[in-house]
Amino acid sequence: MITGTVTDASDDSAIENAEVTVFDSSTRQFVAGTMTDASGGYSVSVSSGAYDVFVDKSGYGQNSTFGLQVSGSTTQNVQLSQVATGYLNGTVTDNDGNPIQNADVEVYSFRSKKTTTTDSNGNYSFELPEGSYVMFVDKTDRMIQFDRDVGVVGDQETTRDFNLGTGAIIKGYVTNQSDVPQNGIDVQADGPATRIQLTNESGYYEMRVPAGNYSMTAFSNQGQVAQNSPDLSLAEGDEVTQNITVAQASISNISVSYVSGSGNPDMSNISANVRMDWGMIQTSLRNDTVSEETKGSFGDILELEGLGVAADDRFEINFTVEGYNPETLLWGAKNVTWYSTQVSQNQFNVSVRTETVTMQGISNAKGNSNLPVGPLQGKDPAEIAWPSGEQDVADVGWNRTIQFGVFDLSTVPTQELSAYQGMTITTNAQTFSRPKLTEDENGTEQLEFWVGGPNETVDGNSHDGFYEAFIPDEVLNNWNVSDPGTELEALYKGEDRSFNAETTEDGAVIELDITYSEGKIEVSANENVIGDGGDDEENDGGDGDEGDDGDEGDDGDDGDDGNSNIGAGGSDDDTSQEDDEEGEEDNQEDDEEGEEDNQEDDEEGEEDDGEPEVETESETDDDGATVQGTVKDAEAGETATVDVPEPEEDQEYELEEVSVTPAEDASFDIDIETSSEPLEDTPDGEFEFDGTEPLGFISVDADIDDGNIEETQFTYRLDEEELEELRRTPKMSRCTSSTTRPTSGSSETPTSSAERAVMSCSRRQRTAFRSGPQRRRLRNSTSRTPKSTCRLRPPTRR
């Protein structure tokens, strides 16, 4: 039992209706809550243990007590200090400046909410405690307006005026595939504003939105999703009818397995929870030792640390979804690799590999249901009144958890779909907006993503988090960005932030650390490329020779992406493969120094005289080729490229070259062997894809220390017929890696490592998505292993 009295710190007077909430200090779960009576007294029944106690009252600062030891009956008296008050007023008018009477004006913060209506002159006024507020103004037959940046200062007056236009009206009916009206379906319009409206018993909905371009979708918490996602262009005063059909989506074949790491997870008590809910596939790992009553709290996020899960442990979650197209992944995961493979017209197999994240949150039990968990559904960030000061503290937290959503692109305009496909954004924020490509005040396109998380952890420490985004090539090319590390900029809360960037086969990965509470992350091209017109020589990273001129814009870069797609997977956009072929043709026509030199210029962005000396001897036969190479005096970070000759007989693929970048100055030998038949020393490995057949085998052996390899890259080539087939039917390449250790007494001993990496590469129908951190992990795994084997597998033709 915890009892006590809450009083005013200035005069010891009793404070009535103060909110008292109690949380278990160890589990961080809500235990009990109550309100103080007229005498300021309260009583909460709890068992013996350690508890965190929070006391709040509008107009006062919050009081927090952590780790209160309770044994029997414990008294905890609390004093609250008043905060200064200020004044907020303004006028609400229409487009012609006429006052609007009886408009609803609402002002709210994390803990308080006040409402009023405008008078005959359109005026309103509030007296409020000092702090930050969100304003909401509404009137029947008028547009809703928000202002989320309203600051009230003690003993001062703040003015906010609002103009309510008529906007446009979207209305219609939602039915199932049998034309039966659907009640309780959320219809969402996403554009200049995000609006959501529930259908009635007749399946009817109606909403008023600002003029602009919108994408429409519909969904329910029972797994129904829209089958048509129309785009609308609306002007002020428009009234448009848009009917929508929904169908039931389903999830099956759910499984979770442990992949790798330093922990020892108890997989008998870890299960995957995958369900269609509110228009997305919500996915989490659950601790099955926790009771059913608490599994549903705070978005199914549960602590896995007590089950032997370490920070670097990696899990694989698999499931099949029918009636929904999974195209992008967001939220609580780290170092993600994921695949979406179409197995029938309306069915996809999804496989996700990820590590756990830490997460902190402010729960609804702490006193405000306005703070969401996970993606904002039908809301703009402007509507969220995030707490500040002493209230911006987590009351729940987890050290090892996985919780993410897989989304379709139903709210993305059709003309922008290809830019978003494959985009992966992960973070340990409590809530976030879906990514949007917007324009800043200068008309520069940027990737915008809003996040919110408590400023302090449950332990009172600063809450540091991360933002990890895979940006597809199409976006980078539109920005004229060829070197993300020097040509991108990242802002958080409007301020420049340092970040790590890595160019990948089909895009780039941006990683930056952030300190919560809430704010907008914006990534865009920086001043190095804005306004340069996409200069070929600069963007291609070449030396300005005539051979580089054959790139014609970004074809040379796209050619690099195309080769990488064949060898290591990437975007499902046919453009990269078409550009690859076009880039090769341009290079053959225009590069007077030879195709191989052009590829080195395009792909490496370095001058010829800056490359290390490479000597090779090679032989070929009908099945493949062998190369014995020596790399002399390669400097740290300098890429040595070993060319591989074509086999005497035509193959479905060719390994064109192998590039090795040492982390430190080095000279080393490298042996390469390719064959259409298994090689004698091909290690055993587990390959993920069924329905495939081997296409080729590759062995690479280098006598360089494991830790001295920064990166290894394989470049492949397909013939014209294969490229034509890829253009007709989108198929992707994919490489994954696994490691095997020789068993005790085994004679199989790699040159300089106890581990051997195995890459399984295959083309898959539909899409293969992968975020950069795992792509980098794949490269490093391959790089550090002196001997690696890659099996290329095309899909079985039917």
Image (cartoon, rainbow, N blue to C red):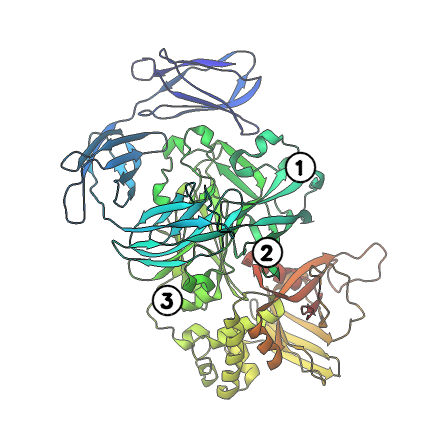
Query: Most extreme residue toward the right, as rendered?
Result: 745
Query: Given contact means CB atoms under 8 Å apart, are the residues at marks 2 and 1 in contact?
Result: no
Disc 1 residue type (three-letter): Leu
Q: Are marks 3 and 2 in contact (CB under 8 Å)?
A: no
Mark 1, residue position: 307
The type of residue carrying mark 3 is Asn
Comparing 795 with 538, the one in front is 795
Image coordinates of residue 696 in percent, x first then y, are 72, 73
Q: x, y (%) of residue 284?
A: 58, 43
Q: Please report whichever mark, 1 or 3, sits nearer to the chain's N-terminal start.
A: 1
Q: Nearer the viewer, mark 3 or mark 2?
A: 2
Q: Nearer the viewer, residue 137 or 623?
A: 137
Residue type pointed to by label 2: Thr
Residue 407 as seen in the image, left or right of residue 341: left
Tell which circle, 2 or 1, labels the residue nearer the N-terminal end: 1
Q: Nearer the viewer, residue 424 or 80?
A: 424
Q: CA distance from mark 3 to mark 2?
A: 31 Å
Q: For mark 3, what is the residue?
A: 528
Q: Which quadrant of the view contains residue 755?
A: bottom right
Foreground tag (1 vs 3): 1
Q: Residue at x 25, y 36 (%)?
A: 104
Tell me the distance, in whole angstroms, between the alpha carbons under discs 1 and 3: 49 Å
Residue 337 image label: 2
Cα separation between marks 2 and 1: 23 Å
Task: Write down the quadrant of residue 765 in the picture.
Answer: bottom right
Residue 128 is left or right of residue 748, and the answer is left
Q: Which residue is rendered at x = 39% and y = 31% of the image?
A: 391
Residue 671, picture quadrant? bottom right
Do residues under tags 1 and 3 come within 8 Å of each other at their CB atoms?
Answer: no
